[in-house]
Protein backbone atom coordinates (compact mmCIF):
# COMPACT_ATOMS: atom_id res chain seq x y z
CA UNK A 1 0.00 0.00 0.00
CA UNK A 2 1.67 3.24 -1.14
CA UNK A 3 1.03 6.77 0.11
CA UNK A 4 -1.71 7.53 -2.44
CA UNK A 5 -3.49 4.23 -1.79
CA UNK A 6 -3.46 4.84 1.95
CA UNK A 7 -4.88 8.32 1.54
CA UNK A 8 -7.67 6.97 -0.67
CA UNK A 9 -8.47 4.33 1.94
CA UNK A 10 -8.51 6.90 4.74
CA UNK A 11 -10.77 9.21 2.76
CA UNK A 12 -13.23 6.36 2.39
CA UNK A 13 -13.24 5.75 6.15
CA UNK A 14 -13.64 9.28 7.50
CA UNK A 15 -15.60 9.38 10.76
CA UNK A 16 -14.62 5.73 11.26
CA UNK A 17 -13.64 4.16 14.55
CA UNK A 18 -10.26 2.54 15.15
CA UNK A 19 -11.55 -0.87 14.11
CA UNK A 20 -12.68 0.56 10.80
CA UNK A 21 -9.27 2.06 10.19
CA UNK A 22 -7.56 -1.22 10.97
CA UNK A 23 -9.73 -2.91 8.39
CA UNK A 24 -8.32 -0.80 5.54
CA UNK A 25 -4.68 -0.45 6.59
CA UNK A 26 -1.96 -2.99 7.27
CA UNK A 27 0.31 -3.05 10.32
CA UNK A 28 3.03 -1.04 8.58
CA UNK A 29 0.59 1.75 7.71
CA UNK A 30 -0.81 1.86 11.24
CA UNK A 31 2.68 2.20 12.69
CA UNK A 32 3.35 5.06 10.28
CA UNK A 33 0.05 6.69 11.27
CA UNK A 34 0.92 6.49 14.95
CA UNK A 35 4.31 8.08 14.33
CA UNK A 36 2.67 10.86 12.35
CA UNK A 37 0.15 11.49 15.14
CA UNK A 38 2.44 11.47 18.16
CA UNK A 39 5.75 12.55 16.62
CA UNK A 40 7.47 10.76 19.51
CA UNK A 41 9.60 8.51 17.29
CA UNK A 42 11.84 10.47 14.97
CA UNK A 43 13.75 7.43 13.70
CA UNK A 44 12.86 4.66 11.28
CA UNK A 45 12.07 1.19 12.64
CA UNK A 46 11.94 -2.14 10.81
CA UNK A 47 8.20 -1.60 10.24
CA UNK A 48 8.46 1.81 8.57
CA UNK A 49 9.96 3.05 5.37
CA UNK A 50 13.57 4.15 5.75
CA UNK A 51 13.82 7.92 5.16
CA UNK A 52 15.57 8.96 1.98
CA UNK A 53 16.01 12.15 0.03
CA UNK A 54 13.03 13.20 -2.08
CA UNK A 55 10.47 10.74 -0.68
CA UNK A 56 10.03 10.22 3.03
CA UNK A 57 6.89 9.15 4.85
CA UNK A 58 7.45 11.77 7.54
CA UNK A 59 8.33 14.79 5.42
CA UNK A 60 7.46 14.17 1.79
CA UNK A 61 4.73 11.54 2.04
CA UNK A 62 1.03 12.31 2.20
CA UNK A 63 0.45 10.30 5.38
CA UNK A 64 2.00 12.61 7.93
CA UNK A 65 0.60 15.66 6.18
CA UNK A 66 -2.86 14.16 6.40
CA UNK A 67 -2.44 13.90 10.16
CA UNK A 68 -1.41 17.49 10.75
CA UNK A 69 -4.45 18.34 12.90
CA UNK A 70 -4.31 15.23 15.09
CA UNK A 71 -1.50 16.20 17.46
CA UNK A 72 -3.79 16.94 20.40
CA UNK A 73 -4.22 13.42 21.74
CA UNK A 74 -7.32 12.74 19.66
CA UNK A 75 -6.25 9.35 18.33
CA UNK A 76 -6.54 7.66 14.98
CA UNK A 77 -10.31 8.05 14.56
CA UNK A 78 -10.00 11.83 14.85
CA UNK A 79 -7.11 11.71 12.37
CA UNK A 80 -9.35 10.20 9.75
CA UNK A 81 -12.26 12.54 10.49
CA UNK A 82 -9.99 15.54 9.84
CA UNK A 83 -8.15 14.05 6.85
CA UNK A 84 -9.34 16.31 4.04
CA UNK A 85 -9.12 19.52 6.09
CA UNK A 86 -5.40 19.63 6.80
CA UNK A 87 -3.26 22.13 4.96
CA UNK A 88 -0.20 19.93 4.55
CA UNK A 89 -2.31 17.33 2.72
CA UNK A 90 -2.30 19.74 -0.21
CA UNK A 91 1.13 18.69 -1.42
CA UNK A 92 2.51 18.90 -4.92
CA UNK A 93 3.15 15.57 -6.65
CA UNK A 94 5.62 15.57 -9.58
CA UNK A 95 5.77 12.38 -11.64
CA UNK A 96 6.86 11.00 -14.98
CA UNK A 97 3.63 9.04 -15.43
CA UNK A 98 0.27 8.42 -13.74
CA UNK A 99 -2.08 5.44 -13.88
CA UNK A 100 -5.50 4.71 -12.41
CA UNK A 101 -7.09 1.48 -11.27
CA UNK A 102 -9.70 0.34 -8.75
CA UNK A 103 -7.28 1.09 -5.91
CA UNK A 104 -6.75 4.71 -6.94
CA UNK A 105 -3.83 6.74 -8.28
CA UNK A 106 -0.37 5.32 -8.96
CA UNK A 107 2.66 7.43 -9.88
CA UNK A 108 5.90 6.51 -11.63
CA UNK A 109 9.14 8.40 -11.04
CA UNK A 110 7.47 10.63 -8.45
CA UNK A 111 8.76 13.30 -6.09
CA UNK A 112 6.43 15.23 -3.82
CA UNK A 113 6.79 18.17 -1.45
CA UNK A 114 5.59 21.62 -0.48
CA UNK A 115 3.84 23.75 -3.08
CA UNK A 116 5.75 26.75 -1.84
CA UNK A 117 5.37 29.56 -4.35
CA UNK A 118 1.95 28.73 -5.79
CA UNK A 119 3.50 28.15 -9.23
CA UNK A 120 3.19 24.37 -9.54
CA UNK A 121 5.46 24.10 -12.58
CA UNK A 122 8.27 26.08 -10.94
CA UNK A 123 7.87 24.27 -7.62
CA UNK A 124 7.91 20.88 -9.32
CA UNK A 125 11.10 21.75 -11.18
CA UNK A 126 12.73 22.76 -7.90
CA UNK A 127 11.54 19.64 -6.07
CA UNK A 128 12.94 17.38 -8.76
CA UNK A 129 16.23 19.26 -8.84
CA UNK A 130 16.52 19.02 -5.04
CA UNK A 131 15.90 15.27 -5.26
CA UNK A 132 18.48 14.81 -8.01
CA UNK A 133 15.80 13.89 -10.57
CA UNK A 134 15.70 14.99 -14.20
CA UNK A 135 13.22 17.68 -15.19
CA UNK A 136 9.92 16.43 -16.57
CA UNK A 137 9.37 16.43 -20.32
CA UNK A 138 6.42 18.65 -21.32
CA UNK A 139 5.11 19.04 -17.74
CA UNK A 140 1.36 19.42 -17.27
CA UNK A 141 0.08 21.03 -14.04
CA UNK A 142 -3.43 20.13 -12.88
CA UNK A 143 -5.62 19.32 -9.88
CA UNK A 144 -7.24 15.89 -9.74
CA UNK A 145 -9.62 14.87 -6.95
CA UNK A 146 -8.34 17.72 -4.82
CA UNK A 147 -4.63 16.91 -5.16
CA UNK A 148 -2.07 18.95 -7.12
CA UNK A 149 -0.01 17.13 -9.75
CA UNK A 150 2.61 17.98 -12.34
CA UNK A 151 3.06 15.03 -14.73
CA UNK A 152 4.68 14.67 -18.13
CA UNK A 153 1.79 15.23 -20.51
CA UNK A 154 2.35 11.93 -22.34
CA UNK A 155 2.00 10.08 -19.03
CA UNK A 156 -1.43 11.44 -18.06
CA UNK A 157 -4.34 9.05 -18.78
CA UNK A 158 -7.19 10.48 -20.91
CA UNK A 159 -9.72 9.92 -18.10
CA UNK A 160 -7.58 12.05 -15.79
CA UNK A 161 -7.37 14.83 -18.36
CA UNK A 162 -11.16 14.79 -18.66
CA UNK A 163 -11.61 15.02 -14.88
CA UNK A 164 -8.74 17.42 -14.14
CA UNK A 165 -9.05 21.05 -13.11
CA UNK A 166 -6.60 23.81 -13.88
CA UNK A 167 -4.34 24.94 -11.05
CA UNK A 168 -5.18 28.35 -9.63
CA UNK A 169 -3.14 31.32 -10.89
CA UNK A 170 0.17 31.43 -9.02
CA UNK A 171 -0.59 34.59 -7.05
CA UNK A 172 -3.97 33.27 -5.89
CA UNK A 173 -2.57 29.84 -5.07
CA UNK A 174 0.27 31.40 -3.08
CA UNK A 175 -2.24 33.41 -1.05
CA UNK A 176 -4.35 30.31 -0.33
CA UNK A 177 -1.25 28.37 0.75
CA UNK A 178 -0.31 31.14 3.15
CA UNK A 179 -3.86 31.26 4.48
CA UNK A 180 -3.88 27.52 5.14
CA UNK A 181 -0.54 27.69 6.94
CA UNK A 182 -1.68 30.66 9.03
CA UNK A 183 -4.84 28.81 10.11
CA UNK A 184 -2.70 25.96 11.50
CA UNK A 185 0.29 27.96 12.72
CA UNK A 186 2.10 27.12 15.96
CA UNK A 187 4.29 30.26 16.11
CA UNK A 188 1.75 33.02 16.69
CA UNK A 189 -1.42 31.49 15.25
CA UNK A 190 -4.32 29.35 16.43
CA UNK A 191 -2.20 26.40 17.58
CA UNK A 192 -0.09 28.66 19.80
CA UNK A 193 -3.06 29.41 22.06
CA UNK A 194 -6.67 28.45 22.81
CA UNK A 195 -8.98 30.75 20.86
CA UNK A 196 -12.64 31.33 21.61
CA UNK A 197 -14.99 31.37 18.64
CA UNK A 198 -14.96 35.20 18.60
CA UNK A 199 -11.17 35.33 18.80
CA UNK A 200 -10.81 32.71 16.06
CA UNK A 201 -13.25 34.56 13.80
CA UNK A 202 -11.36 37.82 14.29
CA UNK A 203 -8.06 36.08 13.56
CA UNK A 204 -9.44 34.58 10.34
CA UNK A 205 -10.86 37.89 9.10
CA UNK A 206 -7.69 39.80 9.95
CA UNK A 207 -5.57 37.20 8.14
CA UNK A 208 -7.80 37.27 5.06
CA UNK A 209 -7.43 41.05 4.90
CA UNK A 210 -3.65 40.90 5.42
CA UNK A 211 -3.07 38.28 2.74
CA UNK A 212 -5.48 39.92 0.33
CA UNK A 213 -8.29 37.51 -0.45
CA UNK A 214 -11.37 39.65 -1.18
CA UNK A 215 -14.74 37.99 -1.30
CA UNK A 216 -13.86 35.36 1.28
CA UNK A 217 -16.12 34.89 4.32
CA UNK A 218 -16.10 33.09 7.65
CA UNK A 219 -18.68 30.80 9.19
CA UNK A 220 -19.07 29.12 12.57
CA UNK A 221 -19.75 25.40 12.91
CA UNK A 222 -20.01 23.04 15.87
CA UNK A 223 -19.89 19.30 15.30
CA UNK A 224 -21.96 17.37 17.88
CA UNK A 225 -20.14 14.16 16.86
CA UNK A 226 -16.64 15.55 17.38
CA UNK A 227 -14.70 12.83 19.28
CA UNK A 228 -12.40 15.36 20.98
CA UNK A 229 -14.48 18.37 22.10
CA UNK A 230 -13.00 21.16 24.19
CA UNK A 231 -13.07 24.92 24.78
CA UNK A 232 -10.76 25.82 21.87
CA UNK A 233 -11.70 26.64 18.28
CA UNK A 234 -9.95 25.40 15.16
CA UNK A 235 -9.94 27.00 11.72
CA UNK A 236 -10.35 25.12 8.44
CA UNK A 237 -9.97 26.57 4.95
CA UNK A 238 -12.47 25.61 2.23
CA UNK A 239 -10.72 27.14 -0.77
CA UNK A 240 -13.33 26.14 -3.36
CA UNK A 241 -16.01 27.88 -1.30
CA UNK A 242 -13.84 30.89 -0.35
CA UNK A 243 -14.68 30.22 3.29
CA UNK A 244 -12.74 29.87 6.52
CA UNK A 245 -14.75 27.72 8.91
CA UNK A 246 -14.45 28.36 12.65
CA UNK A 247 -15.08 25.09 14.46
CA UNK A 248 -16.40 25.92 17.89
CA UNK A 249 -15.53 23.75 20.90
CA UNK A 250 -13.51 21.49 18.62
CA UNK A 251 -10.44 20.63 20.69
CA UNK A 252 -9.02 20.73 24.22
CA UNK A 253 -6.11 23.05 25.09
CA UNK A 254 -2.79 21.74 23.84
CA UNK A 255 -0.55 20.81 26.76
CA UNK A 256 3.19 20.14 26.70
CA UNK A 257 2.68 16.43 27.23
CA UNK A 258 5.31 14.22 25.54
CA UNK A 259 2.79 11.38 25.40
CA UNK A 260 0.76 13.46 22.93
CA UNK A 261 3.18 15.88 21.27
CA UNK A 262 6.96 15.78 20.99
CA UNK A 263 8.71 18.47 23.10
CA UNK A 264 10.54 19.60 19.95
CA UNK A 265 7.26 21.06 18.65
CA UNK A 266 7.06 23.54 21.51
CA UNK A 267 10.80 24.25 21.58
CA UNK A 268 10.88 25.00 17.87
CA UNK A 269 7.74 27.16 17.97
CA UNK A 270 9.18 29.25 20.82
CA UNK A 271 12.46 29.66 18.98
CA UNK A 272 10.77 30.79 15.77
CA UNK A 273 8.57 33.17 17.76
CA UNK A 274 11.42 34.90 19.61
CA UNK A 275 14.12 34.77 16.92
CA UNK A 276 12.11 35.45 13.75
CA UNK A 277 8.48 36.51 14.34
CA UNK A 278 9.35 39.26 16.82
CA UNK A 279 12.34 40.52 14.81
CA UNK A 280 12.64 42.10 11.38
CA UNK A 281 14.80 39.79 9.29
CA UNK A 282 15.50 39.44 5.61
CA UNK A 283 14.53 36.11 4.07
CA UNK A 284 18.09 34.70 3.83
CA UNK A 285 18.80 35.49 7.48
CA UNK A 286 15.44 34.10 8.60
CA UNK A 287 16.17 30.86 6.75
CA UNK A 288 19.59 30.57 8.42
CA UNK A 289 18.02 31.09 11.85
CA UNK A 290 15.19 28.64 11.16
CA UNK A 291 17.62 25.91 10.11
CA UNK A 292 19.35 26.20 13.50
CA UNK A 293 16.01 25.65 15.25
CA UNK A 294 14.58 22.63 13.42
CA UNK A 295 15.68 19.04 13.05
CA UNK A 296 17.64 18.10 9.94
CA UNK A 297 14.65 16.00 8.78
CA UNK A 298 12.27 18.95 9.10
CA UNK A 299 11.39 21.21 6.21
CA UNK A 300 12.16 24.91 5.80
CA UNK A 301 10.57 26.47 2.72
CA UNK A 302 11.21 30.04 1.55
CA UNK A 303 8.94 32.19 -0.59
CA UNK A 304 10.33 35.57 -1.77
CA UNK A 305 8.05 38.54 -1.12
CA UNK A 306 9.70 41.85 -1.98
CA UNK A 307 6.55 43.76 -0.99
CA UNK A 308 7.10 42.79 2.65
CA UNK A 309 9.28 44.74 5.07
CA UNK A 310 10.21 41.76 7.22
CA UNK A 311 10.02 37.98 6.99
CA UNK A 312 6.93 36.31 8.43
CA UNK A 313 6.90 32.71 9.59
CA UNK A 314 4.36 29.88 9.84
CA UNK A 315 4.95 26.47 11.38
CA UNK A 316 2.67 23.53 10.59
CA UNK A 317 3.09 20.14 12.26
CA UNK A 318 2.54 16.76 10.64
CA UNK A 319 4.89 13.77 10.85
CA UNK A 320 7.60 16.44 10.80
CA UNK A 321 7.74 20.18 11.35
CA UNK A 322 7.21 22.29 8.23
CA UNK A 323 8.34 25.92 8.46
CA UNK A 324 7.43 28.41 5.74
CA UNK A 325 9.17 31.79 5.52
CA UNK A 326 7.88 34.60 3.33
CA UNK A 327 9.84 37.80 3.09
CA UNK A 328 12.16 40.23 1.27
CA UNK A 329 15.77 39.78 0.26
CA UNK A 330 16.61 42.89 2.31
CA UNK A 331 14.74 43.78 5.51
CA UNK A 332 13.25 47.28 5.81
CA UNK A 333 12.41 47.83 9.52
Image (cartoon, rainbow, N blue to C red):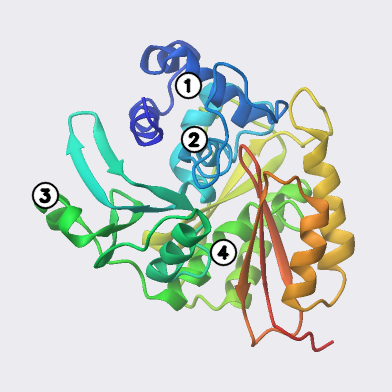
Question: Which callout, 2 or 4, points at the residue further toward the start of the chain?
Answer: 2
Relative image position of residue 152 (x, y in whole percent) = 24, 59
Neighbour tally class for label 3: few under 14, some 14-19, many 20 plus, Cα within 10 Å: few
- The residues tagged by marks 3 and 4 sit, at their Cα atoms, a distance apart of 32 Å
Relative image position of residue 256 (x, y in whole percent) = 84, 33
**Quadrant where the C terminus is found in the figure:** bottom right
Residue at image mark 1: 29
Residue 63: mark in rendering:
2
Residue drawn 55% across the image and 78% down it: 212
Question: Which callout, 3 or 1, points at the residue further toward the start of the chain?
Answer: 1
Question: Which callout, 1 or 4, points at the residue further toward the start of the chain?
Answer: 1
Dot 3 lies on which element?
helix
Image position of 28 with respect to 329: above or below: above
In the figure, is residue 77 to the left or right of 144?
right
Nearer mark to the viewer, of 3 and 4: 3
Q: Looking at the image, do the residues carrying marks 3 and 1 touch, with CB atoms under 8 Å apart?
A: no
Residue at image mark 4: 179
Image position of 22 with respect to 132: above or below: above
Relative to the observer, which residue lies in front, 170 or 184?
170
**Quadrant where the N terminus is found in the figure:** top left
Question: Which callout, 2 or 1, points at the residue further toward the start of the chain?
Answer: 1
Residue drawn 28% across the image and 48% down it: 145
- The residues tagged by marks 1 and 4 sit, at their Cα atoms, a distance apart of 30 Å
Amino acid sequence: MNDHELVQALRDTRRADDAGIAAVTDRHALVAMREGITMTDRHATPTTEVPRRGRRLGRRGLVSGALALTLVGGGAAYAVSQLADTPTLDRLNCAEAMTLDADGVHLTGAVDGAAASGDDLADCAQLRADAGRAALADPYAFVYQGTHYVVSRAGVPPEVVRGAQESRPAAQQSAVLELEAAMDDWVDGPKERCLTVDEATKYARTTLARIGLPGWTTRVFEDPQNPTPGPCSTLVVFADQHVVEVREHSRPPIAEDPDDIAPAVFTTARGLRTQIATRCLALPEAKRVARTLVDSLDEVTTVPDETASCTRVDMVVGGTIVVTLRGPSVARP
